[in-house]
Image (cartoon, rainbow, N blue to C red):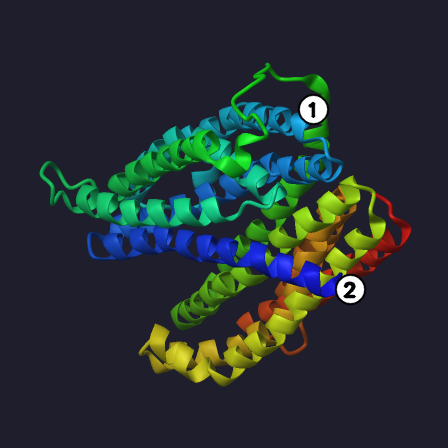
Amino acid sequence: MFVQQSRLIAGYAWPMLIAHLVSMGMPVIDTVLLGHFATEDLAAVAVGGGIYITVLLALSGIVQAVSPIAAHLKGAGRDGDLAGVLHQGFWLALILSLPGVLCLSHPDFLLELSSLEPAVDLKTRSYLAALAWGLPAALLYRAFYAFCIAVGQPRPLMTVSLLCTLIHGLLASGLVSGRWGGTPLGVLGCGISNALIGWLALAAGAVYMRVSASLESYGLYRGWRGPRKETQLALLRLGLPMGFSGFIEISAFTFVALFVARLGTEVVAGHRVVANLAGVCYMLPLSLGLATLPCVGQAAGARDWARARVAALAGLAVASAISVPFGAALWFGRTALTNAYSGDPAVRGVCLSLIVYLAANQVFDAVQTVAAHALRGYKITFVPMLAHVTAFWGVGLLGGWWLAFRAPEPMGAAGFWLAQTLSLAFAAVFLGAMLWRAARSGDA
C-alpha cells in the first residue's frame, strides 16, 4: 500500500509542479517587460504586486477549503454531493471577492505604509484597480482548482496554466509597449492583461467542467442552489485558518524584505535573489502537499484510517527523499546560481552567504508543508494555523529581527535566514508530531 500511495502522490504532484512553475512566469514576464519600459512602472508593479498577492493568497486560501470537504465526500462514495460543494465554493468566492475588490480599489491604508513618489503612487493605484476587475475570476477559478485537487484531476490545472502564461506574455507585451497600436500603457497594461487572463482561466475551467468525461458523473452543471448556511459555515471553519496561514507566511517574507532594506543595496539585492530561489524551491513541497491532501482526505472520508495513515507517511517520505538531494544541489550549485543572477561581486558574496540556509532548510520546509496539507486532509486546520503563527511570526520574524539587529553579534540578513531555518524546523517537528497523532488516533 505504501508504494501504491507514493506513486499516486507522485502522479498527482508533477502536473501541479509544472502548473505552479509556469504560473510563476507571469510576474517574471511583468518584471522583464516593465524593466525595459520605465523604472517608475517597475517600482509600481513591485509594490502593487506585493499587495495583490497578499490579498489573493489570503482569500483563495479560504476558498480552497473546498478540497478537504470534497475529498471526504469522494472517499465516502457520496459523488452526488460533490457538485453542491463546488457550487457553494463558487458562492463563497463571490462573497469574498467583495472585500477583496474594495481593498484593491481603495488601497490608501496600504500605500500609506510606503513613502512612494507621486508618479509611482498613481501608477500603483491604476495597476491595482485593473487587477481588481480580475479578482472575482481568480477566486472562482481557485474553487475549481481546489475541486480538481480533491477528486484527483490535476492535469487540467497544468494545461490552463500553460495556456494562460503563454497568452499573458503576448498580450502584456503588446499592451505595455503599444506595439499593436495605441498608447503604451506600461504597468496598467500588465494589470489589464492579468485581469483578462484571470477570466480566461475561469472560462477554460468552465469549458473543462462541461466537456470532461472524468467530471461528467459529478453533474457539475446540475442542481444549482443559492448559498447554504451550513455549507458556508463548514467552508469558513476550515478555510479561515487556511487563508490566515497563507497570509502569515507571505506577510512574514514581506516584513523581512522591509527589515533587510536597512542593510544596504547589495544586501537587499542578494536577499532578493535568494528569496526568489526560495520561491521556486517551495513549489516542489507545495505540489507534494497538495497531492497528499486528497489521498489522505479520500481515505479519511471512507474511514479507512490505515490507508489515510499510509498516505500521510508516503507524502512525508516522498517529500523528504526529494528534498535531501534538492538541498544538496543548491549547496553544490550555489556558485553557478549566484553567478547567473548577478555580476556584482558584492551581491554574489551576500548570495553565497545566504544560500547555505536555503539549502539547509529544504527538508524542514518539505516536512512542514506536506504535514500541514495532510492535516487538512483530516480536516484539521486551526491548530496548524497557530503553529504557523508561532513559527513564522514568532521564531522567524521576531527571532530574525533580534539575530539581525540586537544579538550580541548582529548577523545582518543572515540572522533572518537562520531564524527562518529554525522556524521551519519548529513547524516541521510540531506539525509532524500532530500528524502522527491524528494518523494514530484516526481523528478526522
What residue is at 67 percent from the left and 62 percent from the top? 6
Q: Residue at x 20, y 41 (%)?
A: 175
Disc 1 residue type (three-letter): Thr
State which tag comes first along the sequence, 1 or 2.
Answer: 1
Name the side, left or right, on which 26 lies relative to 318. Answer: left
Task: Tell me the element at label 2.
Answer: helix
Q: Dot 2, how many residues are within 10 Å of its Cα: few (below 14), some (14-19), or many (20+)?
A: some
Q: Is residue 336 visible?
A: yes
**Outermost residue toward the top?**
226
Q: Is residue 391 above or below residue 142?
A: below
User: In the rendered structure, which amino acid carries the disc numbered 2?
Assistant: Val
Q: 255 left or right of 158?
A: right
Give the numbered dot on residue 24.
Answer: none
Residue 114 percent coordinates (x, y): 43, 46
Q: Position of residue 441 (x, y in %)?
A: 90, 51
Point 51% across, 78% down: residue: 330
Camera sees residue 315: no
- Vertical side of 405 occupied by 87: above or below: above
For numbered disc 1, what is the local secondary structure?
helix
Disc 1 to disc 2, C-alpha distance? 33 Å
Q: Is residue 122 left or right of residue 287?
A: left
Tell me where residue 1 appears, x and y as whole percent.
76, 61
Labelled disc at residue 231:
1
Q: Nearer the viewer, residue 96 or 299?
A: 299
Which residue sits furthest right? 441
Residue assigned mark 2: 429
Question: In the depicted view, which residue is nearer to us: 52 or 259?
Answer: 52
